[in-house]
Amino acid sequence: MTQLQKMDSRLVSEFENDMKGSQNAIRNAQCHKIFQGRGKKYMKIKQDTKQQLYCMVQKQGMKIKDAALKLGIKYATAKTIIFHQRQKRKAKRECGERMCGYTRRYGQRSSRLKIISIIGSEVVHQQDYNL
């Protein structure tokens, strides 16, 4: 009987050791996957692609998300590229098509600006400005 008990206790201890080892292996694998999941993947965007993105958004009027999908760039990367391009333009005080911010004045012409506020299909407020 004692020999059987010793064998049983050995088997149980071996089984427990195997379980602990496999649990440690699983835990290590999970930690490794979590660590890999947290790491950011960066990709280098060519200058060509940046220019295409900027033209699509600024000149053609596409949304950043649509242009990024078309060019195969992540949306966050595309937003960052557009943001930095706009910052550079503002720093240089350049004018361009479909760009808000700075406009050139042509001679003695005065510009008329009309702002109309519409809610639903009803005109709520309308204001004319001469610049």
Image (cartoon, rainbow, N blue to C red):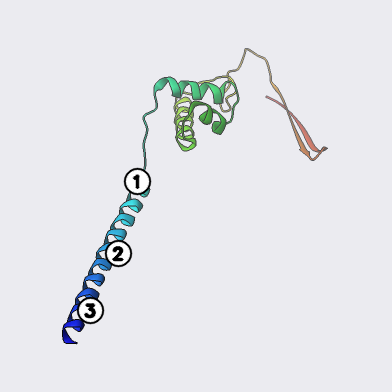
Which mark is first along the chain, 1 or 3? 3
Query: At label 1, which amino acid type do we have?
Result: Gly
Q: Are marks 3 and 1 in contact (CB under 8 Å)?
A: no
What is the spatial separation of the Cα atoms under label 2 and label 1, in whole angstroms?
24 Å
| Side of 76 where 127 appears, left or right | right
- Residue 48 position in % (x across, y down): 43, 19
In this view, the residue in front, 124 or 34, is 34
**Cα distance between the residues tagged 3 and 1:** 47 Å
Residue at x 25%, y 72% (from the top left corner): 16
Kind of element beneath mark 3: helix
Mark 3: amino acid: Asp
Say which mark, if any, is on residue 23.
2
Position of residue 115 relative to residue 96, above or below, is below
Q: Amino acid at mark 2?
A: Gln
Relative image position of residue 25 (x, y in whole percent): 27, 59
Q: What residue did someone put label 1 on?
A: 39
| Label ID, residue 8 | 3
Q: Is residue 22 left or right of residue 120?
A: left
Question: From mark 2 to mark 3, how far is it between C-alphas?
Answer: 22 Å
